[in-house]
Image (cartoon, helix red, strand yellow):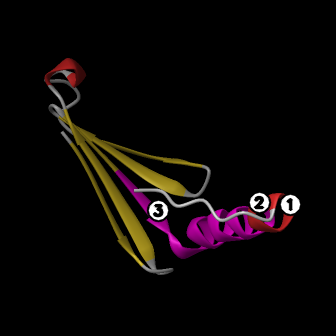
Amino acid sequence: MHIYFRCKKIFAIYCEINSILGKKPLFSLYKYHKEYIIDMPFTTLILSPSPVLKQDLVAYDQQDKRTGEKSYST
């Protein structure tokens, strides 16, 4: 199961719950490209702060200018 929650430009949380992830580690926290990744049994959480989301919006705006079309994601 995948869950993605985004609060405008403030933060975003991605949660993946899957039996393939396994029982270990009990708890693990590390940082990768300004995002915090938390590993727990059968679960992975990715916390994205506002600087990461703002970079994503800049790339999205540049894509619109190049193609002249708007693309919408669900």
- Residue 17 position, x and y percent, is 18, 37
Image quadrant containing the N terminus: top left
| Label 2 close to label 3 by CB (< 8 Å) | no
- Residue 55 position, x and y percent, is 68, 66
- Residue 40 position, x and y percent, is 20, 38
Q: In the rendered structure, which amino acid carries the disc numbered 3?
A: Ser
| Label 1 close to label 2 by CB (< 8 Å) | yes
Question: To which residue does mark 2 refer?
Answer: 63
| Label 3 close to label 1 by CB (< 8 Å) | no
Quarter of the image where one finds residue 64: bottom right
**Residue plotted at (15% across, 33% down):** 41
Q: Which residues are magenta?
A: 46-62
Question: To which residue does mark 1 refer?
Answer: 66
**Residue plotted at (72% across, 63% down):** 69
As helix, strand or loop, the secondary structure at mark 1 comes to: helix
Extreme front residue here? 69
Image quadrant containing the C terminus: bottom left
Question: To which residue does mark 3 refer?
Answer: 48
Q: How many marks?
A: 3
**Residue plotted at (57% across, 68% down):** 53
Give the distance between the C-alpha atoms of the residues marked 2 and 3, in whole angstroms. 21 Å
**Residue plotted at (52% across, 61% down):** 72
Q: In the rendered structure, which amino acid carries the disc numbered 2?
A: Gln
Question: In this rendering, would 29 be left or right of 69?
Answer: left
As helix, strand or loop, the secondary structure at mark 2 comes to: helix
